Amino acid sequence: TDPTCAGAPIRTATQPAPVANGNYNMPNFIADTAGTNHFSVSYSGDSLNSPASVTCTAPLVVSKVTPGLTVTPPTNHVVDNVTHNATVTVVAPYTQGSPSPSGIVVNQYLNDATCSVATPQQATVSGATVSGGGTGGYSVAFLQQQAGSYYYKAVFAGDQFNNGQTSTCVGPLTVSKATPSLAIPTPTANVSAPGTISASTTLSNAFFGPTLPASQVIFN
């Protein structure tokens, strides 16, 4: 990024001593950092020739990679207190051997097919290592403690090697209401009038999340 080539170089390569006038190719450099590169070349001289040099060349721009980013929702299920995994797929990032890309955030939206209105639940991807140009899959766990339609969007802010990327909004994951069952009410005993009758029933297969709904068991 130094247009004057006055600072310390990030790469240096030396060719064997020339034996004739002609073209001399620079050894290949690995462009592993995005940015603007400049090159200079110099000839050291010898007992027959004075030194020579060339000022900075025109810039060579090394661009960041734009990876692919998709998210797959969990499968449809009945509302529960169990985490279910969404899957994030990252295609062809540049990694230089490090876990990459880092800082992917997956957003879960309830009843928002545009992934833009509702306040999402968020989870950050971490873990797998993707080789440069390869494909990596990551699992991200979410709770769905309300019945409804859930939608997902993944966001990658970008890093020194990769441009930021946002997946499309996908879904819905349909989370159905639970189906409770009731046992037939059982009176405690026969009574003579006027008397007090009591009975009981058993509620099963109902779901109760962190916020209790306004529901009742009604005896008629």
Image (cartoon, helix red, strand yellow):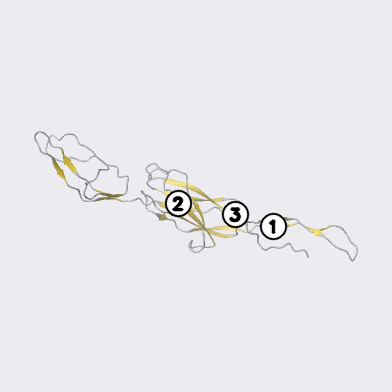
Point out which mark residue 104 bears: 2
Residues at marks 2 and 3, CA–CA distance in whole angstroms? 26 Å
**Amino acid bearing label 3:** His
Answer with mark 3 or mark 1, whichever residue precedes in sequence: 3
Frontmost residue, 93 versus 39: 39
Disc number at residue 77? 3
Ranked by sequence position, the earlier of labels 2 and 3 is 3
Compared to residue 218, the image places residue 19 above or below, namely: above
Label 1 secondary element:
loop
Tell me: 167 left or right of 52: right
Residue 200 appears at what percent x and percent y? 79, 58
Taking depth in this image into account, of 36 and 165 the one nearest to the observer is: 36
Q: Is residue 194 above or below residue 188?
A: below
Quote the CA–CA distance across marks 1 and 2.
38 Å
The numbered mark at residue 167 is none
Callout 1 amino acid: Pro
According to the picture, the residue beneath numbered tag 1 turns out to be 180
Q: Residue at x 13, y 41 (%)?
A: 52
